[in-house]
Image (spheres, helix red, strand yellow):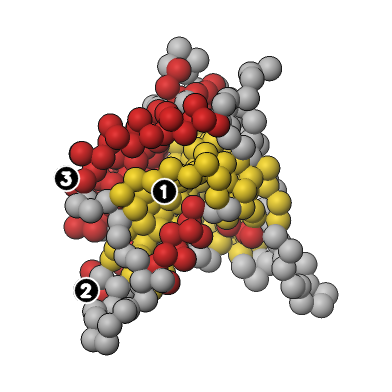
Amino acid sequence: MTPDPDPRALQAAFATAAEAMWPMLHARLPGISLEVLPSADSTNTRLLQRARAGDASPTALVAIEQTAGRGRQGRSWHARPGDALTFSLALPWSPDAGDVAALDGLSVAVGVAVAESLHPDVRVKWPNDLWRLDAHGVPGKLGGVLIEVAPVAAHAAGQPAQRLVVIGVGLNVRGQAPRAELAAAPRAACATPAVPPAMPYAALAALQPGEPALAQPAAVWQRVLPALVEAWLLFRREGFAPFAGRFARRDALAGRDVTLWQADGGQQAGRACGVDGQGRLLVHTAAGPVPWSAGDVSVRLA
């Protein structure tokens, strides 16, 4: 059994990584701060709270331990020190860049950038998961992306409206998966929400045992964060189009039969056939290719 890492050593490693990355990241995103917390409930939540208090500064916030990370379908994640990389990147975004619909496809673009920064075997499962496929094509989940947008509180009358885009990334670094719990939520009488089956987990450390950096959360952060910043800058300039071909080379669902779990409890089956120009999933059904947005469905292999 691998011994648990020393939290102080982890914090020192993250501080060293931050110092190494800061000059380059500051040149690309002037004013960016890189912060390391020994523990946080959720790095996304912390940055969204800052936005609501009026702080719109670009910030990368990493937590050595995350006790209530948030995912889709109301899951709450507990990532233990050394087992996972959990961080968020807050990016100011003005309304003149478009409305929230302009961010369609961002989670897919982020997934592509993260996958490319890690290993050739990492695949992107639409819209926001990172997978490893074994020799038989059986997937294991390496991590995921959660993107949220919040208005930034204005401190002065007439101050231009601004939003903060928060990109959260969680990656399973060592062999143990983060603990997940479904959040308790009110349910309508006689209604049973459909929840897709959980995906088995995979670890970055197992991708290439001869590459020790993939077993060190701080070293993984040093790979992923610069790639994420570049992806944001490219997406902000050109939208999803530059990522379409890159996604096709990493698409974990291409040509596979899938089941779409809809928010109203319904299900639909089809075959995944890539994405359209906006990053929406195309599923071939009897009616032909049908596009689906990330907020409409959850997708699992059939």
Left or right position of 27 against 296: left
Residue 138 visible in image: no
Residue 188 visible in image: yes
Q: Quadrant of the N terminus?
A: top right
Nearest to the eye among marks 2 and 1: give it: 1
> Which residue is the extreme one toward the bottom?
157
Instruction: Identify whether 166 is placed above or below 158.
Output: above
The secondary element bearing badge 1 is classed as strand
The residue at the point 76 percent across, 73 percent down is 187
The reply to whether discs 1 and 3 touch (Cβ–Cβ < 8 Å) is no
- Whichever of callouts 2 and 3 sits on the residue coming sooner in the sequence is 3
Tag count = 3
* Residue 224 in the image, given as x and y percentages of width and height: 36, 37
| Other residues around mark 3 within 10 Å, as few (<14) / some (14–19) / many (≥20) | few
Per the image, the residue denoted by label 1 is 61
The secondary element bearing badge 2 is classed as helix
Per the image, the residue denoted by label 2 is 96
Per the image, the residue denoted by label 3 is 27
Query: What amino acid is found at the position of numbered circle 2 in the picture?
Result: Asp
Rounded to the nearest angstrom, the CA distance separating label 2 from label 1 is 26 Å
